[in-house]
Amino acid sequence: MANHVYKQVELVGSSTTSSDDAIQRAIQRASQTLRNVEWFEVTSVRGHIENGKIAHWQVCLKVGMRIEDPGE
């Protein structure tokens, strides 16, 4: 990793399957519209419970995008 500069955004991924799936969905979707997505950090995990079972996962994450150098 050289002398890069990053922009950071916060996302919330959701899934009825798992917390890992929620993370994958958030990163996949962000990568469709954002360039140079290079890292993520999970900041919190929460969920919705129905009838004593997990019905929905929500994962909050920070995603880092490398800012392009003017010469790139």
Image (spheres, rainbow, N blue to C red):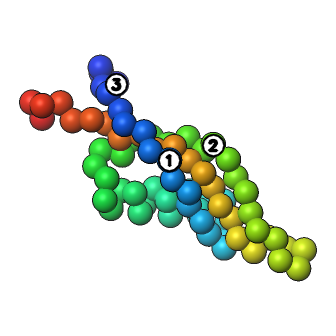
Mark 3 to mark 1: distance in Å?
Answer: 22 Å
Crowding near pointer 2: few (<14 within 10 Å), some, many (20+)?
Answer: few
The residue shown at (30%, 21%) is: 2
Dot 1 or dot 2, earlier in sequence: 1
Q: Answer with left or right where residue 61 lies relative to residue 31.
A: right
Quarter placement of the C terminus: top left
Quarter placement of the N terminus: top left
Relative vertical location of residue 3 with respect to residue 36 in this rendering, above or below? above
- Disc assigned to residue 10: 1
Q: List x then y, in percent, for residue 66.
A: 31, 36
Mark 1 to mark 2: distance in Å?
Answer: 9 Å
Crowding near pointer 3: few (<14 within 10 Å), some, many (20+)?
Answer: few
The residue shown at (88%, 79%) is: 51
**Quarter of the figure with residue 57:** bottom right
Q: Answer with left or right where residue 60 lies relative to residue 49.
A: left
**Is residue 58 visible in this depiction of the protein?**
yes
**In the image, farthest residue toward the left:** 71
Q: Answer with left or right where residue 68 lies relative to residue 44.
A: left
- Mark 1 in CB contact with mark 2 (< 8 angstroms): yes
Q: List x then y, in percent, for residue 12.
A: 56, 57
- Mark 3 in CB contact with mark 1 (< 8 angstroms): no
Q: Answer with left or right where residue 55 lies relative to residue 10.
A: right
**In the image, farthest residue toward the right:** 52
Query: Mark 3, mark 1: which one is toward the viewer?
Result: 1
Q: Which residue is mark 2?
A: 43
**Quarter of the figure with residue 33:** bottom left
Q: Which residue is mark 3?
A: 1
- Disc assigned to residue 66: none
Q: Amino acid at mark 2?
A: Thr
Q: Secondary structure at mark 3?
A: loop
Q: Amino acid at mark 3?
A: Met
Dot 3 or dot 1, earlier in sequence: 3
